[in-house]
Amino acid sequence: VLGAGTGLGEAFAVYEKSSKQFRVYASEGGHADFSPQNDDEIALLPDRFTPTVLDFPFHRLWPVGLAGLVPVALFVINVVYTILATLRTHEGQVFKYPITINFIRS
């Protein structure tokens, strides 16, 4: 049930056993969702929302993959440079990290 107004007004009906009638409750359309559960409900979706195997959204997932790989790569680089610094300073050499940010100037 839809009604015109300033927003997307919707309503839902609940059957009450005591009065043997449906009772209608007002609701807000922004709080509703449609998640199809079977083929008949999927057929109600517009064509652009019909899921197929070829339409898997890889183009939308690359930022997630990148966001997961960058911290792992930085961690590996940090471990490698920590090992190198430990080995070189143990041998008496001076080790300088390739990227150093000097927050305190002397």
Image: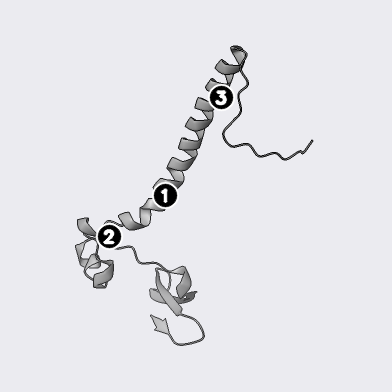
Spatial separation of the CA atoms under disc 1 and disc 2: 27 Å
Classify mark 2: residues with Cα within 10 Å, few (<14), some (14-19) or many (20+).
Answer: few
Instruction: Kindly indicate the quadrant of the structure image that contains residue 105.
Output: top right
Local SS, label 3: helix
Q: Residue tagged by mark 3?
A: 82
Residue 59 in the image: x percent, y percent?
33, 57
Q: Amino acid at mark 2?
A: Gln
Residue 93 in the image: x percent, y percent?
61, 17
Local SS, label 1: helix
Q: Residue tagged by mark 1?
A: 64
Q: Amino acid at mark 1?
A: Val
Q: Amino acid at mark 3?
A: Thr
Q: Residue tagged by mark 2?
A: 37
Spatial separation of the CA atoms under disc 2 and disc 3: 52 Å
Quarter of the C terminus within the rendering: top right
Residue 43, numbered circle:
none
Quarter of the N terminus within the rendering: bottom left
Instruction: Kindly indicate the quadrant of the structure image that contains residue 54.
Output: bottom left
> Mark 3 and mark 2 in contact (Cβ < 8 Å)?
no
The answer to which of 44 and 72 lies nearer the viewer is 72
